[in-house]
Image: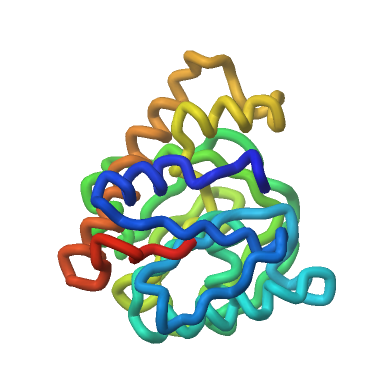
Amino acid sequence: MAWEGPGLIAFEARERGLFLDVRRFDQGDSIPNPDRVEGLVVMGGPMGAYETDKYPYLAQECRLIRELAHRNRPVLGVCLGAQLLASALGANVYPGQQAEVGFGSVDLTAEGKQDFLFEPVEGPVPVFHRHGDTFDLPAGAVLLASSKQYLHQAFRFGSRAYGLQFHVEPDSETWSSWREQLPNQLGGVDDPRQSRVEQVGRGVISRFFDAALSQGILSRRDSTKS
């Protein structure tokens, strides 16, 4: 959606000199050739990952995600992006019992506490929820985090593909845009919950890019497709 944006993801990528190529498939942008994609970030949207009849590009997007995940390229799926990653890896995505919207937290599993992305985070992870669908854990994936309402909140496939059902990427500009769309779930400009999510999110996203660069996967130009 036009008012969402990549927030801290874009900031952290540009801080490292990475080139961002933003594709809006709902606006007719083309699916990139996987041979030209060194890293992939998949953001959210109002559709379900299973609505390929209404949105045919979702099937093409899943093929791209699956190809890159199996090549062990860095992949980060957020909200719908996490559901698409799960679907691309063969798991079922389906409507949940009720929507999970608003500030909340997720609890790290034993594996999540040892994962590079979340290892420094102590206690429950402050996040923002905005989803109504959920998914089964893909075969071979490692569950990293759960909430009281939904078991599958974060997972890793291989060593470089991550799905985050929740949001930790909003920055001040993102919160401002969201406030007009979600007035009942967001507090005022000085709501301390926003800064807590942003602080944790900055670390999580920073470590995602640090891991990709340290392993020599991403180059510092023409590198990241999202």
Q: Residue at x 28, y 57 (%)?
A: 209
| Residue 51 seen in render | yes
Occupied quadrant, residue 11: top left
Q: Please tell me whether residue 178 is drawn above or below residue 98 in the rendered image.
A: above
| Residue 138 seen in render | no
Q: Position of residue 1 (x, y in %)?
A: 67, 48
Q: Position of residue 61 (x, y in %)?
A: 60, 74
Occupied quadrant, residue 195: top left
Q: How many labels does the image show?
A: 0
Q: Residue at x 71, y 31 (%)?
A: 181
Q: Residue at x 37, y 53 (%)?
A: 108
Q: Which residue is drawn at 59% across and 66% down?
A: 83
As rendered, which of 184 and 222 lies closer to the eye?
222
As rendered, which of 138 and 221 lies closer to the eye?
221
Q: Residue furthest right?
A: 54
As rendered, which of 129 and 28 lies closer to the eye?
28
